[in-house]
Amino acid sequence: MDRAGAETMLMNLYRHIDRTQVQFDFITFTSEAGDYDAEIRELGGRIIPILANNPIKRMLKLQQFLKTHPEYEIVHAHMLLSNAFHLLAAKSAGVKHRISHSHNTSNGYSSPIKKVYEKWALITNRRVATYKIACGELAAEYLFGTTKDILLLPNAVDIQEMTKVANKSRDYISREFNDFGLKLIQVGRLSDVKNHQFSLKIVEELKKRKVDFTLYIVGQGSLENDLKQQVQDKLLSDNVKFLGVRSDITELMASADYMIMPSLHEGFPVVLVESQTVSLTAIVSDRISIEVDLGVGLVDFLPINSADAWADRLLVSKKSDVNEKTILDSLKLQGFDAATNAQQLMQVYMSL
C-alpha cells in the first residue's frame, strides 16, 4: 500500500466510508512496509501479506486464507488481469461476492505468451466476478468488454482538503528548494510505462535552449538507479531532482508551473484529478485516455515523438481562465469527490 494511483484512490475512499458499517482489510503480496500501513491500522484495518513466488502459489495461499477466514463476505480486487487469480481463489473458498475493479485501459503486453495470458485473464475476470467496477468507460471496455452493467466510479480525491492545502502552498517549491525558474513535476512510479526516458529528452532540450528550470521527479521504482545515472551522465543534475516518495504531493503540485506525464499508457491516473483540483496545467501523452480531461482547461495532449514539441509547449504560458469554484463544482458534478464516492461504494457493499 504505497503512494501509487490505485492505492491512493483506495485510501481516499477508506478515509470517508462509515467504518462502523464497513471495514477494509488489505491483502498484499510483499513483506515490505507500505507508505499507508500505519494509517490503515489507525483506521482499524489489517494488512495481511501473502508471500509466494508465482501467481499459482499465491492463488492457492489466498484460497486457503479465505477458507479459514469465513468472516470476509466480499473480496474486492484491484490488480487488473491478476484479478482473475484472486477472484478464482475467492470463488473456490466460497466467497459469494467477488468484485473486479479496473483501473487501467491496457497492460502493455506484446509477446505471444503474454497475449495468451491476457486473453485467459480477461475471460476469467468476466466470468468469475459477481460485480464489476471501473474508473472510466475505457477501463471498463478493456477489462470487461463493455460498459453495460458496470459501475463507473471515478478515481476521486478529497477535493475540499486538497484545495485548502493548495491555496496555502503556491510558493512551496520556492521556499523548500530555493528554485525560482520554471518548475516542472512528474509524479509516478519509476518504471518503463511512465516513460521517464522521454522526460529526460525534454530536459535536454530545455537545457539546450538555456532555460532556467527544474524537473522534480516524485516516486520510486525499479528504474531509479538507472535514471539517476543517466541524469549524471548527461550532466543534468542541476536541472533534475529526485524526491522519492512524498507526503506533500498537493503542496508540490500547487506550486509547480506544469505537470508532465509522457506515459506509454494509463487508465485514469488519480494524480491528474489531483492536478486539476489544484489548478495545475498538465501536459500529457496522447496515449492517455481523453477521459482524464475534466473540461476545465488544464490538460493538453501531445504525441511522444518529439521532445522539441513538448519543450515548445512548456515555454508557452497558459493559465486556465476558469476560476477555482468553477473547477471544484465541475469535479464534484463529474463524480470526483471522494466523500460522495465512498458513500456510493458503501451502498454497493451493503446491498450485496
Image: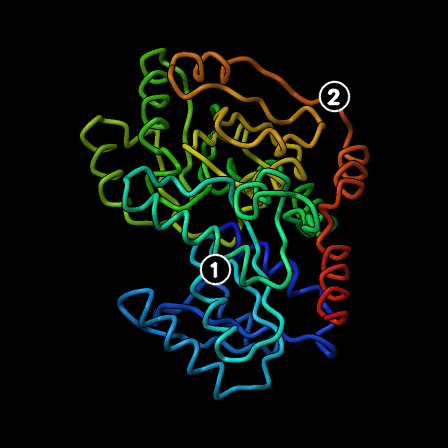
- Residue type of the residue flagged with mark 1: Asn
Tell me the residue at 39%/69% (across/down): 33
- Secondary element under disc 1, as helix, strand or loop, is helix
To which quarter of the image does residue 240 belong? top left
Horizontal relation, residue 190 to residue 121: left or right:
left
Q: Nearer the viewer, residue 110 or 165?
A: 110
Horizontal relation, residue 341 to residue 260: left or right:
right
Q: Is residue 6 above or below residue 72?
A: above
Q: Nearer the viewer, residue 100 or 329?
A: 100
**Callout in the foreground (1, 2):** 1
Q: Position of residue 151 (x, y in %)?
A: 69, 52
To which quarter of the image does residue 202 belong? top left
Residue under circle 2? 321
Tell me the residue at 55%/55% (across/down): 126
Contact check, label 1 and label 2, Cβ < 8 Å: no
Q: Please rate how many residues cluster around mark 2, counting C-alpha atoms within 10 Å: few if below 14, some from 14 to 19, many from 20.
A: few
Q: Nearer the viewer, residue 310 or 138?
A: 138
Q: Position of residue 174 (x, y in %)?
A: 51, 35
Horizontal relation, residue 68 to residue 10: left or right:
left
Kindly give the residue lying farthest to the left in the view shown: 233
Q: Position of residue 348 (x, y in %)?
A: 73, 64
Q: Position of residue 303 (x, y in %)?
A: 45, 19
Residue under circle 1? 83
Q: Is residue 153 above or below residue 293?
A: below
Instruction: Determine which of the numbered discs, if any, sits on residue 214 in the image.
Output: none
Tell me the residue at 25%/32% (across/down): 231
Q: Earlier in the sequence, mark 1 or mark 2?
A: 1
Exactly how many numbered labels are in the figure? 2
Q: Please rate how many residues cluster around mark 1, counting C-alpha atoms within 10 Å: few if below 14, some from 14 to 19, many from 20.
A: many
- Residue type of the residue flagged with mark 2: Asp
